[in-house]
Image (tube, rainbow, N blue to C red):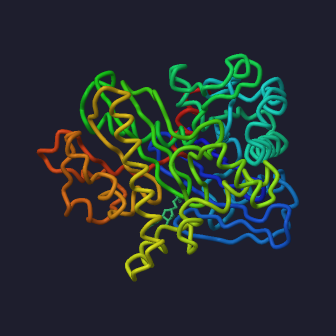
């Protein structure tokens, strides 16, 4: 069975074609600059890469281009569209309307548009354009929606509610939803397999540390808490997002800077985080390079990040009543030993004993144990694979 995984943004469309027998990637690529001059598709397949330059006014044309590339003489890997069993679409926000992976129907699309667009105005409308483009080009091919929020649907009410009037939660759905769910699901499942324990006996903290970062508490294989909230702004400070902040400080800042409330939220999303603290970059590679040269604000940004992640690891160990493993994943989590070491330093009281050499070893793309053999709590680096989760969920549904 072959599953096409589609991740559509407002001006880009990433895809992977996955062979479910081997779970290997047959082909992948990215259509860039949709609706903008100079659009193109960079496609990989058969061990080759090819650029398709063509005007791509909308997501329907983008999907046509992808299907042509999949059947191309050089980088193509299929003879016809019939070889694709189904399509799995990444969807960011589900609100309380979709608790799990869902097949696309006209009713589902209506609910998505009417109820979830306002929850993720940047992401969900773009993803739906991807779905509708596929429907136009691929006819009645089964399509599944895989939500970033689904894995967090098992959080108990006392974890996901904010301390606001209960009626406002009921009326408007204002609560913590969490994000990066496919990644937290994938790495926690891999960790459980690695630990060789029964899922119900495990207590794991998963740290997805990338340009956007979130940390989850996974008890018995189920998410019981996570750091992102109603939107991805909450939790630890990130590349450009502030993370948690007192709302009264935002009101004060908005007054001082002459910003409307939505301008202030935009500032918190796009101009803060480690970028705002360092004044140098949102990219951790730049921060580490500059901190090594003595830039104190870059070092401060790194210290704040590691401290905030550590604080959540401790909080979640308390929430779960113990800790078997800490998992690091995503761009920073997989590639930055200094951040992992800083997060784990001082966690000896939780049974963590780091293996310095293993932590500084190369990223092999496989699971790596970076705690000592004697460490009661394991520390693992697990490369994430969100596309594979989307493909697995889609295959299971169809
Ligand atoms: P992501 O959003 O998962 O792609 O992660 C992006 C972040 O990961 C950026 O801050 C990068 O600096 C960081 N990152 C990615 N690759 C590396 C690497 N090889 N070494 C250090 N940091 C990296």
Residue 50 horizontal/vertical position (percent): 65, 71
User: Is 362 rendered above or below residue 163?
Assistant: below
Quadrant assignment, res 340: bottom left
Q: Quadrant of the N terminus?
A: top right
State the residue at coordinates (26%, 35%). Answer: 324
Task: Give me the residue at 78% from left, 26% from top.
Answer: 108
Residue at position x 67%, y 47% in the image: 6
**Residue that extends furthest to the right in the rendered view of this protein:** 57
- Counting labels gives 0
In the displayed structure image, the side of residue 81 where residue 329 appears, left or right = left
Most foreground residue, 282 or 263: 263
Task: Check the image and name the residue furthest to the bottom.
Answer: 293
Q: Report the front residue among 54 and 114.
A: 114
The answer to whether residue 278 of the structure is visible from this angle is yes
Residue 375: x and y in percent read 16, 44
In the picture, measured across the screen, residue 195 lies left or right of residue 217, that is left
- Indicate the quadrant containing the C terminus: top left, top right, bottom left or bottom right: top right
Q: Is residue 83 visible?
A: no
Q: Nearer the viewer, residue 80 or 177?
A: 177
Above or below, 162 against 138 in this view is above
Q: Position of residue 18 (x, y in %)?
A: 55, 47
* Quarter of the figure with residue 14: bottom right
Vertical side of 7 occupied by 298: above or below: below
- Taking the image as shown, residue 122 lies to the left or right of residue 320, namely right
């Amino acid at each position: 069975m072959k599953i096409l995984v589609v991740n559509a943004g407002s001006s880009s469309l990433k895809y992977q074609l996955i062979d479910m027998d081997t779970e290997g990637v047959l082909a992948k690529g990215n259509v860039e600059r949709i609706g903008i001059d100079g659009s193109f598709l960079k496609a990989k397949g058969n061990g080759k890469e090819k650029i398709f330059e063509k005007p791509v006014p909308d997501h329907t044309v983008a999907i046509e281009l992808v299907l042509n590339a999949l059947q191309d003489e050089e980088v193509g890997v299929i003879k016809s569209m019939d070889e694709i069993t189904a399509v799995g679409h990444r969807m960011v926000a589900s609100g309380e309307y979709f608790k799990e992976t869902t097949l696309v129907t006209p009713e589902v699309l209506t609910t998505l548009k009417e109820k979830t667009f306002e929850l993720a105005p940047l992401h969900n409308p773009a993803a739906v354009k991807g779905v509708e483009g596929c429907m136009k080009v691929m006819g009645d091919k089964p399509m599944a929606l895989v939500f970033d929020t689904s894995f967090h649907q098992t959080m108990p009410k006392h974890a996901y509610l904010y301390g606001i009037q209960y009626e406002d939660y009921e009326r408007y759905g204002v609560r913590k939803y969490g994000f990066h769910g496919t990644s937290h699901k994938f790495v926690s499942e891999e960790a459980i397999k690695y630990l060789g324990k029964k899922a119900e006996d495990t207590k794991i903290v998963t740290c997805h540390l990338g340009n956007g970062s979130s940390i989850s508490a996974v008890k018995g294989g189920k998410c019981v808490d996570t750091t992102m909230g109603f939107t991805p702004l909450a939790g630890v400070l990130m590349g450009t997002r502030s993370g948690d902040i007192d709302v009264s400080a935002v009101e004060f800042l908005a007054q001082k800077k002459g910003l409307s409330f939505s301008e202030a939220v935009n500032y918190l999303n796009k101009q803060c985080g480690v970028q705002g603290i360092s004044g140098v970059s949102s990219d951790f590679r730049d921060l580490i390079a500059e901190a090594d040269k003595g830039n104190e604000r870059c070092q401060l940004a790194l210290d704040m990040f590691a401290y905030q992640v550590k604080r959540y690891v401790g909080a979640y160990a308390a929430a779960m009543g113990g800790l078997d493993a800490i998992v690091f994943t995503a761009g920073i989590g997989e590639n930055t030993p200094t951040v992992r070491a800083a997060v784990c330093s001082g966690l000896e009281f939780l049974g963590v004993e780091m293996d310095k050499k293993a932590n500084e070893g190369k990223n092999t793309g496989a699971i790596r144990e970076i705690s000592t053999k004697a460490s009661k709590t394991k520390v693992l680096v697990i490369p994430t694979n969100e596309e594979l989760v989307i493909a697995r969920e889609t295959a299971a549904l169809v």
